[in-house]
Amino acid sequence: MNREDETTTAADARLVAPSADTEDSAVEAALRPRTLDEFVGQERVRQQLDLVLRAARQRGATADHVLLSGAPGLGKTTLSMIIASEMNAPIRITSGPAIQHAGDLAAILSSLQEGEVLFLDEIHRMSRPAEEMLYMAMEDFRVDVIVGKGPGATAIPLELPPFTLVGATTRAGLLPPPLRDRFGFTAHMEFYEPVELERVIHRSAQLLDVEIDPDGAAEIAGRSRGTPRIANRLLRRVRDYAQVEADGRVDREVAAAALQVYEVDTRGLDRLDRAVLQALLKLFGGGPVGLSTLAVAVGEERETVEEVAEPFLVREGLLARTPRGRVATPAAWTHLGLTPPQQAHGASGQQGLFGT
């Protein structure tokens, strides 16, 4: 297991983890929209993708290759399935880590049907030999299969039927330019606004047969970190609480009480997030403090703090990464209800960096 896999495992254990666990995958299959009209949010991406697919259908051709980038849980897999549905084509799903050799990719490509959609999740984690084979497959619909070894090896060209590759990545910057350039359409998935998440929650509640009022949906949406997957997960936990501790109906009070039980606060921070902030504020006066020292204080691995907790804290403006170390912002003191010491008035990091 490599470092990225270990970090993913640590993140998966959290209620607010953006990655999907086994339960999420099963529920998402039932909640997933089937068409672009049903898909909530990402208005610009939906509009652009609709034009690409409608034009392909009018030409009677396969759609251009599509690259979807963005944080986990924003709907990249869902959009890939919608692309297949809109094109009335079958879909094949695999992932970059599963393709470690060029032969693995060749086996998949050679079995594709004409017009089929190949969804390649975490495309940035594909092996380099497979990546180079994919260049030719995407551009010329052909691959060269190497038979034999050494001086006697020969390349046998294998023609492929036209297909549509949908690549998904959380780290678009890791994709080499030759691969990115072969996608006809690229889209970046943005985090959702609370109003959009409320629509997601109402739709999911209807499919799950959960009675929820607008205030209850707004309470859950505000704690969902801008991510539909987290919103649906919190909805299921609130549903459980409402079923056991209330009359089954979800309002603002029930949602707030349920999420307090699960330690998700009003800004979506969980136990780990608050532990990082509390250590930074109470033990180190708001920083700056080194990442390794902060991780020891929290009792977590360095990678867990850096890759699991910090991205959301930085995005929320509660923590800043500076050359001297991690620094709490004034918003962090306010959120935890603490009074900053006199020297922490420049917690944005500017005072420590420039001495002004």
Image (cartoon, rainbow, N blue to C red):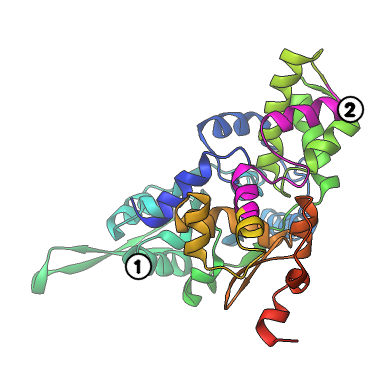
Q: What amino acid does circle 1 point to?
A: Arg
Q: What numbered label is drawn on residue 346?
A: none
Q: What numbered label is drawn on residue 213?
A: 2
Q: Which residue is mark 1?
A: 128
Left or right: 302 in relation to 210: left
Q: What amino acid does circle 2 point to?
A: Asp
Q: Nearer the viewer, residue 314 or 295?
A: 295
For label 1, the crowd category at 10 Å Cα-Cα, with few meaning under 14, some 14 to 19 and many 20 or more, is: some
Q: Is residue 105 above or below residue 240?
A: below
Q: Nearer the viewer, residue 207 or 105?
A: 207
Left or right: 324 in relation to 242: left
Residue 330 lies in the magenta-colored region:
no
Magenta part of the chain: 250-278
Task: Give percent across and percent down for residue 284.
Answer: 61, 62
Q: Secondary structure at mark 2?
A: loop
Res 57 seen here: yes
Task: Give percent across and percent down for residue 273.
Answer: 63, 49
Task: Give percent across and percent down for residue 11.
Answer: 52, 46
Task: Give percent across and percent down for residue 21.
Answer: 52, 36
